[in-house]
Image (cartoon, rainbow, N blue to C red):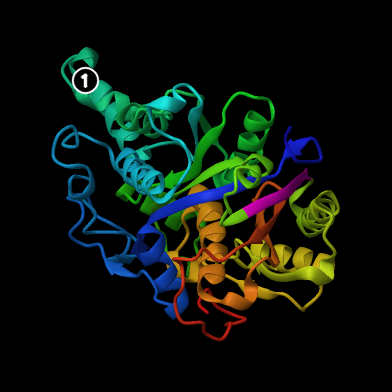
Amino acid sequence: MSSTRGGAPVLAVTGWSAVSPIGTGAAGFTEAVRTGRTGGADVSGMFDAPLPTGRAHAIPDFRAADHLGRKGTRHLDRSTALALVATKLALESTDAAVDGDADGRVGLVLGTTAGSIRTTSEFSRDTLVEERPYLVNPVMFPGATINCPAGSSAIRHKLRGVNATVAGGQMAGLNVLRYGAHLIGGGHADVLLAGAVEEFSPHMAWGHRALTEGYDVPLGEGSAVFVVEDAERVRSGGRTPEAEVLASAFGTGGPGDTARTLEASVVRALRLAGVGADEVWGVATGEHGVEGLDGAEDAGVRAALGDGPVRIRVKRLVGECNSASGPFQLAALLAHHRSDPGLDGRVSVLTSVSADGAAGAAVVRGHRPPDGAVPAQTHDQEGGGL
């Protein structure tokens, strides 16, 4: 029997990892959040094509072969490479049954904005500029499909269960958690790898510049993946999860109603979780430097929770990672729990809004794993660090 909130089971996070501009692996990411290390890097030599700026929150030295070996990595698009490594590291971090004995019961749900926009754009371009449309390089085709990162990760890591791609932009992380909860609650999987991926490329950089004209919003990239299971099953087996996603709620209104939509989502998520607003110690928001959206998110959070909770703005460290933003927000919350024994068992909230008026929230209860101890620091109310 599954423990449920609003018809979906409580999800237990039993492992996670990240490939990010500030660190790779759960330990590396946690240390960066603890110290407030930002991910700005020189990206001028990453591509032959021009970039709008020589700096971004990218990972210039990332090489899939360093983590996966050379076999099968030469022609990977960047989104797929990031997802493959994050999934591998997440699998290595968990005590869940993910080997051959769980055949068909371990799946993957991965969020994205539009897959590898660079590969899709270049593949489409070649159909127009080559002497014949069918003379395009066939090696590029898999990367031009939106589900390539999820499909390739499942094949590489022998995940034979449900495989799904959620194209949700800023809302992808929350949508992945909700979809994953319903998959597990419906009996379609016992264990899921749930996360998102976003790549840095000239195509993303120029598009990002056009959309954020007039704002200082650095572009980022990366992937964060969590191993999730039914919380009741985890605890009945004598295991302690690193976190539990107690409930989530979503709403849609006009762009001018974003603050009210988010407030209602936070209030509903807390009600479904059985948690009072005064119990929330922190809020991981998606604020990223665009005044209108940030103002709406801030107003919605304050209306629902007041000024008490610590505000965690991880995008100040990792940059604007679009679909991977929500997973990085969750990873930042777990990094705080790993770093501060005083937060063991306490509740936080993750929020996200989009330019089209959508908003959502998830309620998370975090725990400090025995092997996750690092020196506790003072919370920074305004930044992503501790």
Looking at the image, which residue is at 16% across and 36% down? 74
Foreground: 147 or 204? 147
Residue 243 to residue 118: above or below: below
| Percent coordinates x, y for residue 132 in the rendering | 19, 14
At x 42%, y 26%, the residue is: 101
Residue 23 image position (x, y, % from top left): 35, 64
Residue 130 lies in quadrant: top left
> Residue 151 vs residue 342: left or right?
left
Q: Residue at x 74, y 37 (%)?
A: 8
Residue at the disc numbered 1: 138
Percent position (x, y) of residue 236?
65, 43
Identify the element where label 1 is drawn: helix
Q: Nearer the viewer, residue 45 or 363?
A: 363
Check residue 72 for magenta coloring: no
Tell me the quadrant of the picture where the N terminus can be found: top right
Left or right: residue 110 compared with residue 200: right
Apparent side of residue 22 relative to residue 366 in the rendered image (left or right): left
Main SS of the magenta part reads: strand
Query: Which range of residues does the magenta coloring cover?
Result: 244-252
Label 1, residues with CA under 10 Å away: few <14, some 14-19, many ≥20 = few
Q: Position of residue 179 (x, y in %)?
A: 63, 35
Tell me which amino acid carries mark 1: Pro
Q: Determine the residue located farthest toward the left in the rendered image.
A: 70
Would you say residue 341 is visible in this rendering? yes
Q: Is residue 163 above or below residue 256?
A: above
Identified at 72% across, 75% down, the residue is 309
